[in-house]
Image (cartoon, rainbow, N blue to C red):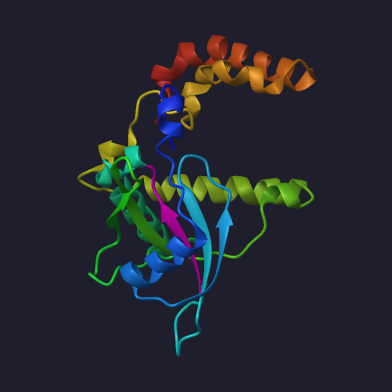
Amino acid sequence: MSSGNDRQSEALSKPTFSEEQASALMESVFGLKVSKVQPLPSYDDQNFHVYITKTKDGPTEYILKISNTKTSKNPDLIEVQNHIVMFLKAAGFPTASVCRTKGDNTTSLVSVDSGSEIKSYLVRLLTYLPGRPIAEIPISPQLLYEIGKLAANLDKTLEKFHHPKLSSLHRENFIWNLKNVPLLEKYLYALGQNRNREIVEQVIHLFKEEVMTKLSHFRE
């Protein structure tokens, strides 16, 4: 994922691995023989849903994640993310498992010759976590309650998480950080001229007036 200020340059850094290359990575980096691979939606990175040839034990479905060139230069960020996933799993949350490479690491930096230059990408592997997106499920008060309860438990649990490189998560102008809602104004054009745009504009305006002025009082 990128900050939003570097969208044009970041568009060039998104990985463009083919399904065949993804299969080759699975075998060379993780020692797993692929039987099927499917591309998944992604933003600035690249994701694949990978099925492996069944083994005696262990999972047969994985998510192969290939970071963009900018994120790949910040391995501390990916390391902290991996440790958070492992921490939450140990605490009993329904998360994926972080897989190790043949060299017993949680990530691997692979280099690809694009013809004009050599680009490096951080690669990691997670077990596949089956489920359905909330958007595909009828919303009910009970479901919203369960989501809120899970979010609260997640928040309380993460208060206990410590890592020497935790500061790598704090990225300025990162559009996925909720305190950076005003940065979304530059993308309003994508909505055209309709009711949805009016709603988004109202939310951003209220955020500036009601939230930005009080940010210093909120726990982060």
Is residue 103 found left or right of 27 in the rendered image? left
Q: Which residues are magenta?
A: 61-68
| Horizontal and vertical percent position of residue 63 | 48, 62
Which residue is found at the position 25% from the left and 64% from the top?
A: 105
Q: Residue furthest left?
A: 164
| 156 to the left or right of 73 | right
Between 141 and 80, the residue placed more toward the observer is: 80
Q: Quadrant of the C terminus?
A: top left
Give x and y (percent) for residue 16: 46, 48
Residue lying furthest bottom = 56
Whether residue 4 is in magenta: the answer is no
Farthest-out residue, front = 115
- From the image, give the main secondary structure of the stretch colored magenta: strand
Relative side of 122 to 145, left or right: left
Q: Is residue 46 left or right of residue 84?
A: right
Residue 92 in sight:
no
Q: Is residue 103 visible?
A: yes
Residue at figure coordinates x 42%, y 28% from the top left = 174
Residue 63 lies in magenta, yes or no? yes
Question: For the image shown, how many numbered marks are present on the structure?
Answer: 0
Residue 205's spot in the image, x, y percent?
61, 11
The residue under the point 58% across, 48% down is 41
